[in-house]
Image: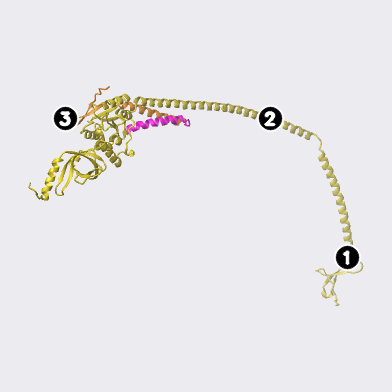
Amino acid sequence: MGTTSIFSVTELTQQIKETLEISYSNLWVEGEISNMKVPSSGHFYFTLKDKNSQIRAVMFRHKNKSLRFTPEDGIKVICKCRINVYEPRGEYQLLIERITPKGIGDLQIAFEQLKKKLEKEGLFDDERKKKIPFLPEKIAVITSPTGAAVKDILNIITRRFPKMAIIIIPVKVQGKEASLEIEDALNTANTYVKADVIILGRGGGSIEDLWPFNEERVARAIFNSNIPVISAVGHETDFTIADFVADLRAPTPSAAAELVVKEKEKLEKQIIQQTSQLKRLLLQILDKNRMQAKHCQCLLGNKLKKLSDLKLKIDDCNFQLTHAINNRVSLKRAEVKSAERIVLSSPPSNIIKNKRQKLEHLTKNISGHFLALKKNKNASLQTCMARLNSLSPLHTLERGFSITTLLPALKTIKDSSLLKKGGRIKIKFAKGSADCKVVEIKN
Amino acid sequence: MMAKKNFEKALVDLENIVQRLDENDLSLDEALSLFEEGIKLSRFCSQKLDSVEKKVEILLKDDEGNLQKEPFENNAT
């Protein structure tokens, strides 16, 4: 190169690119992620920064796909990377190969992230959880057929409920393929086996060992299962995503077996106890009713006895009554008879005597009155006759007067004009009479 | 699903019947019909418990990928 050489922009940029990319082709950088962006390409774009500086970084899709967690702003990470210079812009950036969270493990972060996400989606909601059947008839166990978990589960179930139907769906419970196999097994349990309940589990191990149970596809397969799922992963202190989604979390596989199967003996005992109590109570009720019936019978018997007593009494009264009446009637009859006899045999009573006296008296009275009345009437008759006598024309005749009457009519003549010459008249005298002929009329 | 639900329900019904019988205010007819029902439920429950007669199997895929059930030997017992 000469004393002073002039670079074109491209030449300089190329030299810088070469220098940088060769010198920083494989390095580890520690920093905090910020300004994280994932465009539709799927590449991760972010900035790595510390207190004073920052540097742009890219993680391409084919690299970030294998990441178990999603980088977020604020996470402190250590990145395996190299420098890349982007010539069209004259900018340099880090091409990230691998990201490891600093401090806590990446798995821990992945766990927290998935947990948050699924929780938000409602996969852990209590109201979505299915009820574990009280007495399942068929249990599907999804686990490794060679692990300790399957032995524990089988031992406990067969101890509690001999002859329970169990179908083991063998899966790998760790390693890359495990989650796919578990997902598949959950589907099989639903469609092919048609179990009443599923136990999904494995024995204890490191977080890496248990990892398949923290994977999203397993979580979703559990969530989508129509059959209740009991998770039983690791030890009591291990919590996996599967535990949160499952319808019931058992702390260990053995515990799952205990939760899912009641002790047959206990159930039998319960039934026997209930049944014998049922019988005892019925006998009690029968006894009570029988006693009541007896009591009633007794009462009824007493009443019947009383009734016949009463009947007798009534009969007795009847008899006495008839007797008394008869007695009385004959007594009275005798009295009447004797009275009759007395009446018939004795002279008229005082009453008759009285009446007779009264009659006599009255009769006497009546003739007295009658005589008085007769005397009285006689006197008035005499008076009348005297008066009549005094008025009689016969007296006048005796003094020389006579009465002339027209014949034949015998009409008394007081006027001579009534006479006709030659007419006949009768002249009555005090003693006798004479028929005469009118000779001459003088008015 | 129905049959299992019935076991639990039958057991609860049985307990309820026992309780009813204990209440002492029943006519003899009522008590008898309750008793009859209780005995039926008890029999049903016992039968249900004994009807489970199956063994432990493992689900395996044969060479053509078909699922097959085979007896599972639990060598831990």
Of the image marks 1 and 2, the number of the one nearer the N terminus:
2
User: Mark 1 or mark 2: which is in front?
Assistant: 2
Residue type at numbered disc 3 = Asp
Which x, y percent locates residue A179? 23, 34
Determine the chain carrying the residue at label 1. Answer: A
Badge 3: few (under 14), some or many (20 or more) residues near its Cα, within 10 Å?
Answer: few
Badge 2: few (under 14), some or many (20 or more) residues near its Cα, within 10 Å?
Answer: few
Residue at point 30%, 36% (across, down): A244
Task: Name the residue carrying label 2.
Answer: A324
What stretch of residues is rendered in magenta? B1-27
Residue type at numbered disc 1 = Leu
Q: Which mark is residue A391?
A: 1
Q: Is residue A353 visible?
A: yes
Which x, y percent locates residue A366? 85, 49
Badge 1: few (under 14), some or many (20 or more) residues near its Cα, within 10 Å?
Answer: few
Chain in yellow on the image: A
- In depth, the one of B31 and A403 nearer the eye is B31
Determine the chain carrying the residue at label 2. Answer: A
Extreme residue in the front direction: A3
Residue A51 to residue A294: above or below: below
Task: Name the residue carrying label 3.
Answer: B63
Which x, y percent locates residue A238? 29, 32
